[in-house]
Image (tube, rainbow, N blue to C red):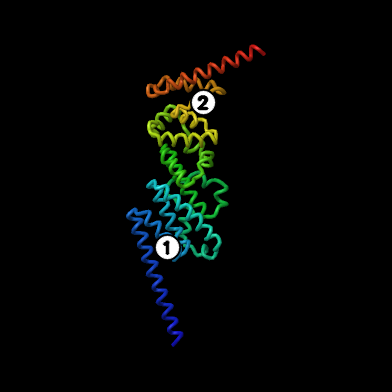
Amino acid sequence: MFLYLCVWLLFLVTCMKLVLFTVLDTLFEDCFQRRWYRTAACYILVIAKLEGVAVSQYCALRLLQATLDESLYDLAGELVRFLLRSGRDIEQAPTESDSLSPKLLGFLIFGSSHKKSSLDKSSSFKEQSPHVASVKSILESHASYLMSGKELSKLVAFVKGTQFDIVDFLQRERYGCAQLQNFAAGLELIGQKLQMSELQNRLDAEFLLAQMCSVKFKEWIVVLATLLQRSEVLYDIFRYDLRLWKAYSVTLESHLAFAQYHDLLQILEAKLSATSREESNRGSIS
């Protein structure tokens, strides 16, 4: 009789758990479909406690991609931290990870629906755990998407919200999605994307300029410094590359759309001429 009662109680508990899991999954899915992403993120924490880390990781990865698509970068940053933290928990429980379904493993490894970035090709990608690699793949893909479209304000918000390593990304994508094929076209397009009359856009441009300087990305430095009219930055580049200065000045002078930079050209011309005279004087003295 006692054994029968224990079996019956175990059956009831199991049924209650199944019902609870179903309700949680339904609530999460309903919020996800309605794009109530912040509410859905709250359910992920409950799912992690009751259904386990692996299930919550699957939900969080889906939610991360959705929040990035909607430019909800603060929430995306919280999800990234949750995924990396819970990913470490999975690594410490190999028996649980062994039981992951092929569908879940596929999502963890391949993650994003966007085009894959060069991170997939790097040797470090193979050395990372699937959980870390999946998060990085999604973030890399989104960064590539923003950089390709020159959505620079969104890129800055993305980097700050998720703590994405933009320097490492720029180093690897110098000849990829971050490459500027044409200075004039790039300056005009980026100038349209980043209206310098708005303070936030100027701050975003300053942030990007600092990142480009850290990786010595000359093409981007010239474009951003021009938009910001940072003559001292441009002077440091052109004083050692007069051929580049000539091409730069001819381009700005020959396009009507760049008339606003003519004062900048005059400042640079004066500085470079003064430097040239000083060097000539030193040469004649010696």
For the C terminus, the image quarter is: top right
Q: Nearer the viewer, residue 162 or 118?
A: 162
Residue 227 horizontal/vertical position (percent): 43, 29
Q: Is residue 129 left or right of residue 21?
A: right
Query: Looking at the picture, does residue 27 appear above or below residue 236?
Result: below
Residue sitting farthest toward the left:
34
Q: Tell me the number on the disc at residue 37.
A: none
Residue 119 horizontal/vertical position (percent): 52, 46
> Element at badge 2?
helix
Residue sitting farthest toward the top:
284
Residue ID for mark 2: 232
Give amino acid for label 2: Glu
> Element at badge 1?
helix
Q: Nearer the viewer, residue 74 or 52?
A: 74
The residue sitting at 44% across, 58% down in the picture is 58
Query: Looking at the picture, does residue 77 appear above or below residue 48?
Result: above
Residue 33 horizontal/vertical position (percent): 34, 55
Give amino acid for label 1: Val
Marks 1/2: CA distance? Answer: 54 Å
Q: Are marks 1 and 2 in contact (CB under 8 Å)?
A: no
Residue sitting farthest toward the front:
199
Examine the image and state in which quarter residue 188 appears: top left
For the N terminus, the image quarter is: bottom left
Residue sitting farthest toward the right:
286
Residue 57 horizontal/vertical position (percent): 46, 58
Q: Residues within 10 Å of mark 1 (few under 14, many from 20)?
A: few
Query: Looking at the picture, does residue 134 appear above or below residue 18?
Result: above
Q: Residues within 10 Å of mark 2 (few under 14, many from 20)?
A: few
Q: Earlier in the sequence, mark 1 or mark 2?
A: 1
Examine the image and state in which quarter residue 115 appears: top left
Residue ID for mark 1: 46
